[in-house]
Amino acid sequence: MNSVKNMRRAKNVGLPGIVVSSAFAVLITAISGGTVNGAPGDLFASINGGPGNGAGAIYQYAPDGTQTMLAYGLNQPRGLAFDNVGNLFVATNFCEENSWCHPTIVKIMPDGRQSTFATIPDSFFAEGLAIDCLENVYVMAISPSNDVSIIFKITPNGGRGSFGFVPGHGFDLAFDRAGNLFAADVTGQTIYKFSPGGERTVFVGPEAFAKPETGPFGLAFDPSGNLFVSTAMYPNTADAILKFTAKGLKRTFVSGLPNPRDLIFDGAGKLFVSEMPPSASGDILKFSHRGEPTVFASDIGVQENSGPEYLAIEPGSMASDLKLLSKQSHLHAAK
């Protein structure tokens, strides 16, 4: 979509509100109060910040685009994910000069305190994060050989195990409404689907990506259950966002993007996309339902793979609150 380039400086200053009935008003107010981590609906982005360790950060954006710094001095932060009570989990990677890395999952609590939630075996590099309805954290970790990636599952108390793997360079993870985990394999040009029990099948393979250099990076489900996928192709000037139905039928949602990375939908169904052009600072784009773009945030980070990587939204929309209420009801009924 050529209009993306023409609107690169058109800043959006507001998100549509969510109208709720009075029956839910008190409940949502009680569950969704603002915290140090932000208010419900705030957008968070991991910023690589430059080569080496300690240059990374987490930026926070209010719905009007106002930017603040949530955390800084992080080691190559990648995947972000919130649990239902507002804890933010961040995949970080302290890497030595020989590229031997030490991945750590950092937990940022609603009051701003940070702690180490879990570690991943040395030599892996942590990328995407996703959290299931039972608050288990899933992490995509690339092996040093770059020819296989392990998906680690970490329980709420920090217990770690291997959930599955993809036979290439893994990137993002996303859950559908049925609890199936989808995983992007960039070099294998494949999106894998894992059942809740860990059984792996191919959702779409190389035939879904038009050119040999193209592969899936970011994954996000819209409110209707369609999977949106960011793709990248060298030299990263004509990349696209693809839309797949639950049956794998594909269409192009938007094209002409420079190196899009992560994707996320807000409570109103608007799509946010991080991108890192190869010769400019990064942006976060916001798309309407029809694929019309605006620049939500611009001039993020510096050039050469140092801009915005992954995105997360502070929970608290009506959908998130009702999901939490449903979960609590099931737990109460089970007692």
Image (cartoon, rainbow, N blue to C red):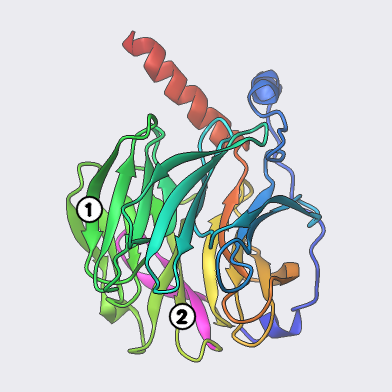
Is residue 111 placed above or below 262 in the rendered structure?
Answer: above
| Distance CA(mark 1)–CA(mark 2) | 24 Å
Q: Which residue is mark 1?
A: 164
Q: Where in the figure is residue 158, as x and y percent of width and height?
A: 37, 34
Q: Secondary structure at mark 1?
A: strand
Residue 66 falls in image quadrant: bottom right
First in residue order: circle 1 vs circle 2:
1
- Is 60 on the left-hand or right-hand side of 257? right
The region drawn magenta spans: 238-253
- Up-down relation of residue 52 to residue 312 (above or below): below
Which residue is tagged 2?
Answer: 232
Residue density around tag 2, few if under 14, some if 14–19, many if 20 or more, within 10 Å: many
Q: Quadrant of the C terminus?
A: top left
Disc 1 residue type?
Gly
Q: Residue at x 58, y 82 (%)?
A: 258
Quadrant of res 188: bottom left
Horizontal and vertical percent position of residue 333: 36, 11
Q: Is residue 248 a member of the stretch shown in magenta?
A: yes
